[in-house]
Image (cartoon, rainbow, N blue to C red):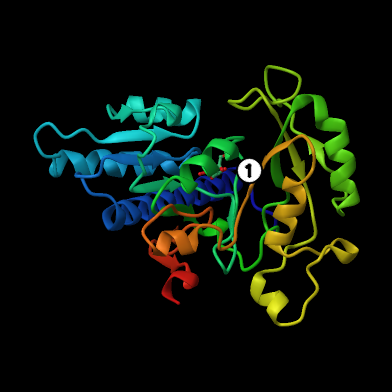
Amino acid sequence: MAPTAAEAKAAAALSTDLVESAKKKAAYAAVADHFTSTMRFVGIGSGSTIVYGVEAIKAHLASNPPPAGHINWFVPTGWNSRKVIEAAGLTPIAFDSLPADAQLEVAFDGADEVDAELNCIKGGGACLFQEKLVACRSKKFICIADYRKNQSRLLTNWPTIPIEIAPIAYASVIRELVALGSEKPILREHTLSKTGPVQTDQSFYIIDAPFKTLLTADDVKAGKDGSGKDGVWEVEALARAIKAINGVLEVGLFCGLNGIQAQKAGLLGGQKPVAVYFGTAEGEVQKAECSELAK
Ligand SMILES: O=C(CO)[C@H](O)[C@H](O)COP(=O)(O)O
């Protein structure tokens, strides 16, 4: 028998509660493991999950105040992220105001989907360019997500790859994406009060491009062809191909070993998170660590 409207509403509310509680638990666990009040520069991502990350940082600072005279600076990944930092009473510093030699100790951010190798899709909130800048300027990038984001391969649940592009180039980028095997790339438009293309913090546009489910590096090592033949791509190969299109500012695939070696040497971090904290539907936190760092 089909559920009544009241039953359907109650089930939806329960599922929202589960997701929110999973986000919060993951955020508090990530902050407990990776934030200290002596840190100088900390990256703060965008989206609904990072709000809990900021809440956890605020709570941590309340019970572990920084040494006298020490300022914790929080680097936002866009307008919305800066508002969240300010609303929590924390001190923001714009990415382009950082001292030239400053490195962020850690950056926390959410993701739209994460695969078995911790490659991520990001950009659901149209902030991917600054998110990548901040992640790559951090010694470690820590991702926080709920159980819906945890998939063995990218483009399993999340349908498209967000790509930030120069407005003038949108039609030609769409044509190039189709040539790479994306069936129906779409220019992201406002759905509520305003009409027209969504504009990013850089006043660029976002194209959402669907592709077949992406292969991992291990799939390719096991003999699968991820070169784009028949539209089947391995994550890094696709990220490189999209980034090479004229007019593309950044692609919402955070992937590969780029930066990991440097990170091992204590230098800059990479695009890929060193750890992802997933809040599970059972109320636990599952931590996945980047296997390359252990090698
Ligand atoms: O990449 C992002 C914004 O561009 C977000 O981190 C991503 O969309 C996750 O958002 P949420 O925490 O609301 O699920």
Q: Is residue 279 visible?
A: no
Q: Position of residue 16 (x, y in %)?
A: 50, 46
| Location of residue 264 with respect to 93 vertically, above or below | below
Q: Quadrant of the N terminus?
A: bottom right
Q: Is residue 148 left or right of residue 281?
A: right
Is residue 121 in sight in this rendering? yes
* Mark 1: secondary structure: helix
Q: Residue furthest bottom?
A: 222
Q: Quadrant of residue 71?
A: top left
Q: Residue at x 73, y 65 (%)?
A: 234
Task: Tally the numbered discs.
Answer: 1
Q: Which residue is mark 1?
A: 5
153 sits left or right of 210 in the view: left
Judged left or right of residue 258, residue 104 is left
Going 44% across and 45% down the picture, which residue do you hit? 137
Q: Amino acid at mark 1?
A: Ala
Between residues 156 and 10, which one lies in front from this camera angle? 156
Specify the farthest residue to the left: 68
Assign ligand 1 to one image quadrant: top right
Where is residue 99? Give x, y as percent: 35, 32
Image point (52%, 41%), residue name: 133
The answer to which quarter of the image holds residue 170 is top right
Q: Quadrant of the C terminus?
A: bottom left
Q: Which residue does the image show at 13% across and 39% down from the upper left? A: 65
Percent coordinates x, y for residue 53 in the rendering: 36, 44
Task: From the top left corner, tell me how far across and down residue 289 is, in percent.
Answer: 44, 67
**Disc 1: CA contacts within 10 A as few (<14), some (14-19) or many (>=20):** few
- Residue situated furthest top in the rendering: 194
